[in-house]
Image (cartoon, helix red, strand yellow):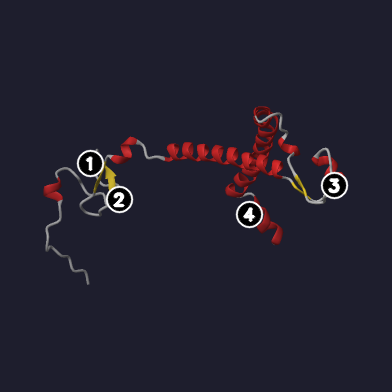
Amino acid sequence: MFLKGLKEFATRGSVVDMGIGIIIGAAFGKIVSSFVSDIVMPPIGLLLGRVDFSNLYVNLSGGNYHSLADAQEAGAATINYGVFIEAVLHFVIIAFAAYLLILQMNRLKRLPKEAGRQKTCPFCFSDISLRAMRCPNCTSHLGKEEENRPQPGYRVNIR
């Protein structure tokens, strides 16, 4: 019983879509990480005087180490602000890509031009196409609206 319910839940479209999104997101994260570490940061480091951002750190232990890897290997307490700068750049790039993706999705979701060309049925008050001759909801004839419009004060009492 439990396995059947789990199988139904896992095979729903939204769960499968979410899983695919997570896989693609992880792959995209690796691409962005490589882009930042291998393409963006080296020129920035060169412009700032041959700075390697992955080796920027503050040593809290008081020892003198040549690189961050040496300090970590010795077990020194460090604040790795260069790694933090790279992580911030990763986040900014991923957030910008997600923003562009959402913009494109919103453009695709906009209503087509014909959706703006609608009128309201005078009988059931539902939205219908301007070209409709009959209301698809209440099947009223929509030839001339003045003739078909219900008269004010006209009531039908059903007992």
Q: Is residue 45 left or right of residue 125?
A: right
Quarter of the rendering occupied by the C terminus = bottom left
Residue 103 visible here: yes
**Tag 4: amino acid:** Phe
- Closest to the camera, between mark 4 and mark 2, is 4
Tally of numbered discs = 4
Q: Amino acid at mark 2?
A: Asn
Separation (CA) of disc 3 from disc 1: 87 Å
State yes or no: discs 3 and 2 in contact (Cβ < 8 Å): no
Residue 137 is marked as 2
Q: Nearer the viewer, mark 1 or mark 4?
A: 4
How far, Cα to Cα, is label 4 from label 2? 35 Å
Residue 23 visible? no
Residue at 63 percent of width and 54 percent of height: 9
Mark carried by residue 9: 4
Horizontal and vertical percent position of residue 16: 62, 46
The residue singled out by tag 3 in the image is: 63
Residue holding disc 1: 133
| Among the two numbered marks 1 and 4 on one chain, the one whose residue lies closer to the N terminus | 4
- The residue nearer to you, when weighing 113 against 85, is 85
SS under mark 3: loop
Closest to the camera, between mark 3 and mark 2, is: 3
